[in-house]
Amino acid sequence: AGVAFGSGGTQLRKGPAYTDRSVYAVVNTDGEVIVENHLHVDGLEEDGGNASKGWIGILQQLDQLSYRGTDKSLVYTPPELHSTDVGLTIKSSNTDYVHNICKPSSTASRFNADTSGSPPNRSEGKVLLLASIHDTFPKPHQTQTYWTSFATLEDAHAFRDTVMLDNPAEVPISAEYMNRDCFDIINNAGRATAFVTTYLGTGNAMRILWDIKVSIEALPLPNFVTSICDTILWKVNGLFPNPLPEQMMELGAQYDHHLILTVGEFEDVGLEEDVVDGENKGTLHRFVERMNAFQANLNYPPYQPSTTTPSNESVDDTPDYVINEIAVNVTPYIINKYPSSTITELSVDRKKALEDGNVPPMTIRRCQPIDTTQQKTNPLLKSEETLVQSFRFAAAPAFKTWCVGNGEQGISVDYALPQNHGSASQDIHSTTKTNTTSFTLPPLSLTSKPTTYESFVTNPYTAQPKKRMRYSHFGCNVVHEDLSYSANVDVHAAKMDFKRGVETLCGGKLPSEHGHGIEYNAPEDTKARWKQLDPCNVMNVGIGGLERDAFYKS
């Protein structure tokens, strides 16, 4: 895939992999292999150090740089390399990414059909990447993970706008969203996967188990044989313990929308508990302060504090919904910045959630560290953050297990929505709005191609899924959806209709993280770029709807 723009979902501050400094091979119009060296590293000459050897010299130098010797017991020390003056001016990461995601843009933040950057960036196999240089990023002094639950998706998007993406310096490390179907399916079909991930990690042991499962599924045998692994996982699911702490399991039963947030301290101000009020408030402290203020204002009636206290009202008479000084101070900030947000205007969904009154609109649960005293007596004890991350990791495998266990078909789709899609600053409940970003969720299968909101409302759906498992990288609006259907549904037609809804009605891009393969037609400008990179059509033939014949003749 080259340097993939589809990466970076769980790395919100870093963004997708990107570089204009690389060595790559292409096949020119005469069918000759050409190696392009754009590393801009001192000592790695543009001619490979030997003009007579040409590009072979470049490859020899790269081999020498990566050679570790035959004695595996020796610690490998890589050679010290230095960029040229030109190299220091060329991008090795998408430095604009974290700034762009904080803007309510009508374009998607990252997607596979993006044509920007040098040839190896999102090349879909049309060039052969040999080596690349990438920026490193600062490691946080401290991290903290939070499980946040919301009664409505609207509230979650308001939180995204006002808290998560308030400014580039305080963007969280990661923000992973899950809906109720996602939570339920992982709990009912993914406990084994979450358990194994918790105690074995995602390294070699998990890779071996996964390879065995994939090998069995690829056998030319009846489906009930090839799906035996998922059948077993479905049968034994109840034998495994709850994948999350008790309080989080309760939140999963009470709420429809969940967000796993990991926030870091990137300023040298000391640990969070050492920060003195009013001084040295770093990125982590400011984020938590803003999050607590949002929760306080969301869970209680909107409140615009007066600058003076009436003479007939003492401080003790302050309404219960004024939680603390932070909430009072930040309320005007949120109202002024997002005048149409759920903070000030209650939608139908929000009113219903408040009227039900079973749970607050938002609940925050901080993941607790390991109790070292208990760990001495129980070495299998894991931190809550580990349990939470393992739970999220099990999402995709759990869906397949769930479909096998229930005898249903499943389709998986990944897509990127515009940054302002679902934004709290939009009136997503208007019945007259025709803007492509007016839908909270992309529509499912449609009987015909709608072009306006009115036709979307009046147009009946065809096949409705039994489960709509939605989990996303919430900061960049890149979404994964797994949908299950009855055995008699044409799932390919449903998938293509869904794709049309994402692109036509929502202004989104599909696919976002996964490649086009031979299933998805790429946009014309993307096809033109691929043809320019591979004029003979010998690299990754047929990708994204391209012709399969030499020189794209068919």
Image (cartoon, rainbow, N blue to C red):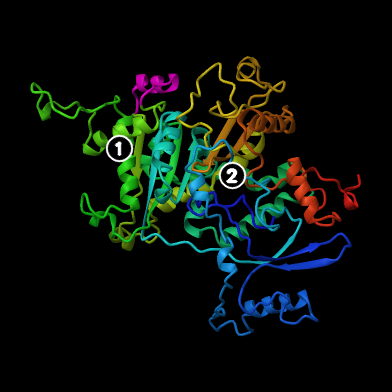
Q: Earlier in the sequence, mark 2 or mark 1?
A: 1
Residue 545 makes an appearance in the image: yes
Name the residue located 89 percent from the left edge and 62 percent from the top edge: 30
Amino acid found under the numbered disc labelled 1: Ala
- Quadrant in the picture for residue 22: bottom right
The image shows a total of numbered marks equal to 2
Q: Percent from the top left, x then y, of residue 70?
A: 64, 84
Question: Does residue 60 lie above or below 140 as drawn?
Answer: below
Residue 365, percent from left and from top: 34, 42
What amino acid is labelled 2 in the image? Ala
Instruction: Answer few, some or many: residues within 10 Å of disc 2's Cα (few below 14, many 20 plus, some between 14 and 19).
Output: some
In the rendered image of this protein, does residue 20 appear above or below residue 548?
below
**Can you say whether 390 is above or below 107 in the image?**
below
Query: Which percent across, then down, holds residue 202?
Result: 54, 58
Residue 399 location, x and y as percent?
A: 59, 40
Quadrant that contains the N terminus: bottom right
For disc 2, the marked residue is: 396
User: Which residue is at a point 21% across and 53% down the rendered structure image?
Assistant: 276
**In the rendered structure, which segment of residues is drawn in magenta?**
344-359
Task: Please report the residue visible at 88 percent of the width from the left and 62 percent of the height from the top.
Answer: 31
What residue would you read off at disc 1?
293
